[in-house]
Image: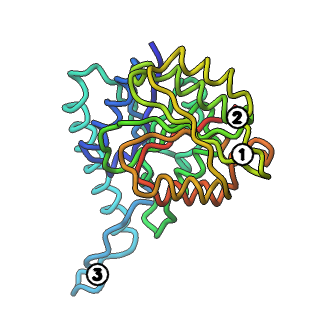
Amino acid sequence: MKKIIAAMDALHFSEQQVACFKYFAGEANGALTLVCMDNLTTGAIPVAGIFSEPPVVTYEQISIEGRAALQWQRSKNIKQLHQLCDKDHIGIDARESVSYPVEEVVAASRFADLLLISNSTSFTALPDTYPPRFVKDLLVEAACPVMVLPDVLSPIKEIIFAYNGTYSSIYAIRQFTLLFPGFADLPVKVVYVAEKNERAIPFEHQLKAYLQAHYEKVEFAIMTGEPATVFLALLIRRTDCIVTYGAFGRSEVSRFFHHSDAENILRTVNIPVFITHP
């Protein structure tokens, strides 16, 4: 059985998010552990009462009261998680982060087959980017494949494999296939973006033979243009598929496309995105 972890904010989550984690763990035939992080030192601190009449509320008192409120919310949320998950034998690993939570989730990913994360997860009370810094940092540093999930998951009807002939794109396809045997009956589309007028798909025969051994329906699509632009146009109106990419944010040689282009895909599309690091 595979080991699957899902990183989530213990202070902010929804039942729908948990249901999404359960779904993908089930499709992977994996044991799911929810890694519930929080960062009480950077959470929002209530400021009501600063300008109230005496007795004057000091900053220190507000900080203490704010932290106590966050701890109460955290305890309430963990109890709710147990109610949602105990009957399904899902592990809950609740931790208070002593630093930025990325480091602890990355450490947990070294001993996991798959990391699930929602694309809106953040651990800061300050305005954040989208996708949040937490998600982007995890994609660069994670030690196992990562599935970035939308806030609302639609039924999955197709698997799209982004392919450019590199080892990293083949590795992503193989890792997804091995992790999710439950998707074997879904249609698969391999999308190859021809660059420099090279329209022959690299290793097409070998890749087709591999995929046909695992999936019932496989097709290849050859497109032209800038890869990031092509995939954005292909996926922007889709909600019913999963796409895979190899190598996020590491060496220039292994990236499918530039870091900023990958972030644009995550920011714009509303589908699960599977990313690996060979």
Specify the amino acid type for callout 1: Arg
For the residue marked with disc 3, what is the amino acid?
Val
Q: Decide: is 104 above or below 30.
A: below
Toward the viewer: 205 or 271?
Answer: 205
Q: Are marks 1 and 2 in contact (CB under 8 Å)?
A: yes
How busy is the neighbourhood of tag 1: few (under 14 within 10 Å), some, or many (20 plus)? some
Q: Residues within 10 Å of mark 3 (few under 14, many from 20)?
A: few
Q: Nearer the viewer, mark 3 or mark 2?
A: 2
Residue 199: x, y in percent? 72, 43
Labels in figure, total: 3
Comes first in the chain, label 1 or label 2? 2
Which element is circle 2 on?
helix
Question: Do residues under tags 3 and 1 come within 8 Å of each other at their CB atoms?
Answer: no
| Marks 3 and 1, the one that precedes in the sequence | 3
In the rendered image, residue 99, in percent from the top left (x then y), is placed at 55, 49
Determine the secondary structure under disc 3.
Answer: loop
Asked whether the residues under the numbered discs 3 and 2 touch, taking CB atoms below 8 Å apart as contact, a structural biologist would say no
**Toward the viewer: 224 or 89?**
224
Could you say where residue 163 lies in the image, as x and y percent from the top left? Answer: 64, 38
Specify which label sits upstream in the sequence, 3 or 2. 3
**124 or 25, nearer to the observer:** 25
Residue at image point 69% right, 51% down: 257
- Gap between marks 3 and 1, in whole Å? 56 Å
| Residue denoted by label 2 | 168
Label ID, residue 88: none
Q: Of the residues tagged 3 and 1, which is closer to the observer?
A: 1
Quadrant placement of the N terminus: top left
Q: Is residue 213 above or below residue 122?
A: above
Residue 255, disc: 1
Q: CA distance from mark 1 to mark 2?
A: 8 Å
Q: Residue at x 61, y 38 (%)?
A: 142
Crowdedness near tag 2: few (<14), some (14–19) or many (≥20) residues, C-alpha within 10 Å: many
